[in-house]
Image: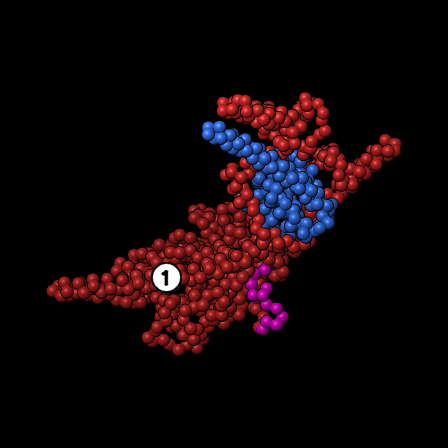
Chain colours: A blue, B red
Amino acid sequence: MGNEKLPYAADAESPLKPAELQVLRSQYEKEGEYVSLQTKFNYAWGLIKSTNRPDQQLGVQLLSEIFRASPDRRRECLYYLALGNYKLGNYGEARRYNDSLLDLEGGNLQAQSLRQLIDEKVAKDGMIGMAIAGGVAVAAGVLGSLAIGAARRKR
Amino acid sequence: MASTPPSSNPQDSGLAYRDNNENSILDPRQLEALGRTAYTTASQLISAHEPITSEHYRNALNSMHRSLRRPALQRSVFSFAQANPAQLLRQNFNVTEIEHRALTYLPDSLLKQVPESNSGFSLLDGFKASLPEADDDSGSEGRRRRKHGRHNSRGRRLLEDEKGPPQLRDLKRSKGRLDHRLEMMGIRKTMCSAEIKEIDAKIANLSTMRSVVLDRLAGLEQEEHDLEQEIMEMAEKVEDMQEQADEEEARSSVTNEDAGSVKREDEDGEPPGFMSASIYEKLPKEPSSLPSSTKGKRRKPTGYRKTSMPVLHEHLDSGSRIREMQAHNDIITALDFDAPFGTLVTAAMDDTVRVWDLNAGRCMGMLEGHLSSVRCLQVEDNLVATGSMDASIRLWDLSQAEYNPNQGTSINAKPSASSEDDESDALFTPTTSSANGEEIGEYAASASTENCHLFTLESHVDSVTALHFRGNTLVSGSADKTLRQWDLERGRCVQTLDVLWAAAQASTINPAQNAGAKTPTGAESAGTGGGWWKPAAGRVMNAEADFVGALQVFDAALAAGTADGVVRLWDLRSGMVHRSLVGHTGPVTSLQFDDVYLVTGSRDRSIRIWDLRTGGIYDAFAYDAPISSMQFDARRIAAAAGEDVVKVYDKTDGRQWDCGAGVLADDQTTPKPSIVEKVRIKDGYLVEGRRDGVVGVWSC
């Protein structure tokens, strides 16, 4: 897979115009049960680019269907799945897909940059977690010491 | 992607925070409020219990509160564009989120099976190519791309192009645009071919599924047929038992009665075979006025015929062989069948008429009585009409045949000279062995169909070459150059139409019309009619051509095609020709019409489709040899045109194709399939009779 053929994560942040998305959607709906792979992908990618969370979820779902159905497209799908999950904030999934793509194509620039992005996000998440945990610990400490102090004073 | 901007001024950064995090769930104010609440609660607690000594706790809380109020810290803790605590909560505890995860989760085993892709274009290419192209080509896509400014060679090129004179720039830009479009075209093309491949794969998959289901259908149909036979047998047994019981009862009650009544009873009990042809001729009553007891018994099986509709042939591939049998040893002169997988009647130059069970592919018997070979016949339900060279027309009722396709026990089977039951068939294997079947076939020929004859119509003075009946009206055409209309209820000729007279009338009333039928040479044929009579074309006017080649009747409307190439539409109420369709340059050999079109086949090698409303030609096409037979169903026109295949014209898509043994046969096949003489088609079920007496059944 040439590196030219995958979009960077920034591309996923630019939503399509509603009219454009509508075109993709109507094409997808028109083809019905025997929808072609490309049409499905078009719609899925359009959805992932959207800012609407349910849309993004549907996009990821369609992509996972494509992944199951057509082995030929799995590599590409891995990246898009990683990207979609990244946008959804499911960093665990995103990392899983992205890493399995990187296992296959170590030199994939898009995947590399996506890994960085995910790492950044996860680091922040970690900070949040630590902050929360720290806050809880402080509160517990305060309360605990209060309780101990109170007990000591009563005695 | 909100990163922390360096900020010294708290107010400024607070604003920036709001701007950057419009979609963030938590508001900084809420955070402050939270901090304040925590502070107040804690200080309350502390002050309540130890107002003085726990000063350091208060200090600690104060400092924490202060630090929380500092926007920079707030941001560093909570300001994330996509992931704030609320989102984390949502991801882990929201039902739809969990559902979504379950739906989209791909197991590791799948992740490992990721082959190298070998398609010509990437999905993204396809995506770009299928987005609607804006008029200003470097529109949505291009602009966005440039905005992000990454990995877009075109964007870069456009930037480079900014230098130079404006005209050159414009030109280059439009060239770039066109290049881009060309590229997109290439991608679209690859997309299309990929899609076609995809569809092909799907079709292949579907067709294997189809063949599996088709096999199942064949099995079911066979089973259904067997069951029906069983039911029929049972019903007959029940009938017999009932009759026996009735007879016993009647006999016991009759013993004391007088001789007259006994005699009458004897008459009733006589075998139905006693009713010979001569009696019917003397008593020209309708078939239904037969003695009721006999009729009741004989007609009983009719109720059990064809309760099921065979549909298998509709699903077989076009042109696949259903059956082939050596029906006769001579040229097939006429054949017809009632329904797909029903009953077939064939007539050949060997002067025999045979009845076939198309489902089992076996001969049910022979229709004997004609003194010469049968030239035309029609089967409709159980009624068969045959027209012969002996100038007579006979009517037969096939429901009178004592035929049991499943069981072949015969007491006095006659050994026969010609046993022609050919059971070479792939799809349907008859239940009896073929050696046994031959004998039965011959036995049946003599015994089981002998009661079928209803009556004979004898008024023609030359061979009957065409007939057609519908309801109670039968019309026959003969070499004596007349058409006769018969009332089947009364078994009498009700009208005679003289074709020559009608033609002469037409030529005197409207000479121009008749002139159309003349050949350019105007060659006169000797002795066919009066001096006015001109054959349509000298080269095909030979002894073989029947004067009346084909006819069809519908209520009072009659269409008849004759050797002069003219198709005349008669009104049976007035007995006049009300329209002549002139166009064929050879004798008309076959003809059929529905509510809109009339289709004719002629020895001039052409098939013509006429519009009945306008009387004009709707369509016409020609083959390489004279058409000897033609019939159409809802979709196809099947014609025998002197080849070893049946020519089929698909009306829906205008396709011409061949169906028959000649298609399957290659050079090695010996003997080569014979030329198809007669053809019949009903609901995509095609039966053809050849010169060597073989009858082939095909789906098309």
Q: Which residue is mark 1?
A: B227
x, y percent for residue B478: 47, 59
Nearest the eye: B539 or B497: B539
In the displayed structure, A54 sits above or below A96; it is above
Q: Secondary structure at mark 1?
A: helix
Q: Is B660 in the magenta? A: yes
The answer to whether residue B592 is visible is no
The answer to whether residue B240 is visible is yes
Nearest the eye: A74 or B69: B69
What range of the chain is rendered magenta? B658-670
The answer to whether residue B523 is left or right of residue B353 is: right
In the displayed structure, B38 sits above or below A6; it is above
> Label 1 amino acid?
Leu
Which image quadrant for residue B168? top right
**Residue at image location 46% in from the left, 58% down from the top:** B217
Q: Residues within 10 Å of mark 1 (few under 14, many from 20)?
A: few
Nearest the eye: B566 or B70: B70
**Residue at image location 47% in from the left, 30% down from the top:** A151
x, y percent for residue B392: 42, 63
**Residue at image location 32% in from the left, 64% down from the top:** B233
Nearest the eye: A153 or B247: A153
Residue under mark 1: which chain is it in?
B
